[in-house]
């Protein structure tokens, strides 16, 4: 009999396999990034259908195999349906999932990354903080958690931007999204984060391309 395990995590990716199955990539606290197959999840009425989509967060029960897992069930804490229903939030959220997937590693605990991802998705639903600010805050904190960041941004910047940078680096994840900035500071801070990302991150994110097209059409 295969061993059954329970992990807390979030579905980063869900892709169709065969006629009725789904292949999931789940970021978990205990085992890092894992691959799991949800058998029959695309069959109408299947119990795994609701818990096998992107953004689903909760406790997953799995059967462990040699190279992957089989999903047996889940106790869902948050589906983040509000994000899926909002085109802009969904584009930001999809990018966050893809960026977390980039840093996720198998058999490496991902407690902080998962916590950051969860709090950042919640921040997309807040009216008090613009999505355009949530994005660079998420990016900088995620890069910091993975040791790929500068203590100081490059070039001359305003004191307010410097303070924003330091606030993100030294704040707990729970307190990250408790501030706002002026448009001028947002643009400068975003530019600094983008420069840091170009230095350390060697990947083109497809979801970010879609987000940029959406924002261009809105503006």
Image (tube, helix red, strand yellow):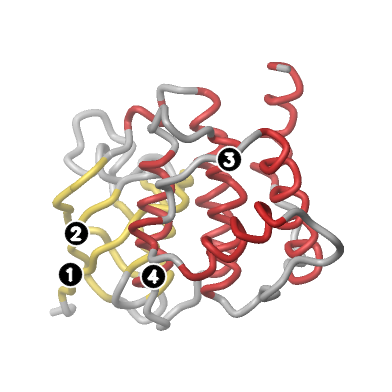
- Pick the quarter of the image with the N terminus: bottom left
Q: Are marks 1 and 3 in contact (CB under 8 Å)?
A: no
Q: Decide which of tag 4 and tag 1 comes sooner along the chain.
A: 1
Nearest to the eye among marks 2 and 4: give it.
4
Label 2 to label 4: alpha-carbon separation: 16 Å
- Residue that mark 1 sits on: 6
Relative height, residue 63 to residue 48 (above, below):
below
Judging from the image, what secondary structure is the residue with disc 3 in? loop
Q: Decide which of tag 3 and tag 4 comes sooner along the chain.
A: 4
Q: Position of residue 199 (x, y in %)?
A: 80, 69
- Residue that mark 2 sits on: 59
Q: Position of residue 38 (x, y in %)?
A: 31, 52
Q: Are marks 1 and 2 in contact (CB under 8 Å)?
A: yes
Q: Position of residue 192 (x, y in %)?
A: 75, 56
- Residue that mark 3 sits on: 181
Judging from the image, what secondary structure is the residue with disc 4 in? helix
Label 1 to label 2: alpha-carbon separation: 7 Å
Label 2 to label 3: alpha-carbon separation: 36 Å
Nearest to the eye among marks 4 and 1: give it.
4
Q: Position of residue 7 (x, y in %)?
A: 23, 68
Q: Are marks 2 and 4 in contact (CB under 8 Å)?
A: no
Residue 112, labelled with which disc? 4
| Label 3 packing within 10 angstroms: few (<14), some (14-19), many (20+) | some
- Pick the quarter of the image with the C terminus: top right
State the residue at coordinates (55%, 26%).
88
Looking at the picture, tell me which residue is in the foreground, 154 or 193.
154
């Amino acid at each position: 009999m295969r061993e059954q395990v329970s992990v807390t995590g979030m579905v980063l990716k869900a892709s169709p396999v065969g006629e009725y199955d789904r292949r999931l990539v789940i970021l978990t606290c205990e085992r890092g990034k894992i691959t799991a197959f949800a058998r029959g999840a695309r069959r109408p009425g299947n119990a795994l259908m609701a818990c096998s989509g992107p953004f689903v967060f909760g406790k997953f029960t799995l059967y462990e195999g040699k190279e992957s897992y089989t999903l047996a069930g889940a106790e869902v804490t948050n589906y983040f349906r509000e994000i899926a229903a909002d085109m802009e939030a969904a584009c930001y959220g999809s990018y966050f999932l893809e960026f977390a997937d980039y840093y996720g590693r198998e058999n490496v605990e991902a407690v902080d990354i998962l916590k950051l991802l969860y709090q950042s998705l919640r921040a997309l639903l807040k009216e008090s903080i613009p999505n355009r600010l949530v994005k660079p805050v998420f990016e900088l904190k995620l890069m910091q958690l993975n040791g790929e960041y500068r203590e100081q941004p490059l070039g001359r910047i305003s004191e307010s931007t410097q303070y924003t940078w330091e606030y993100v680096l030294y704040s707990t994840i729970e307190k990250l999204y408790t501030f706002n900035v002026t448009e001028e500071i947002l643009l400068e801070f975003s530019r600094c984060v983008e420069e840091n990302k170009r230095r350390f991150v060697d990947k083109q994110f497809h979801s970010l391309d879609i987000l940029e097209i959406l924002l261009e059409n809105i503006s």
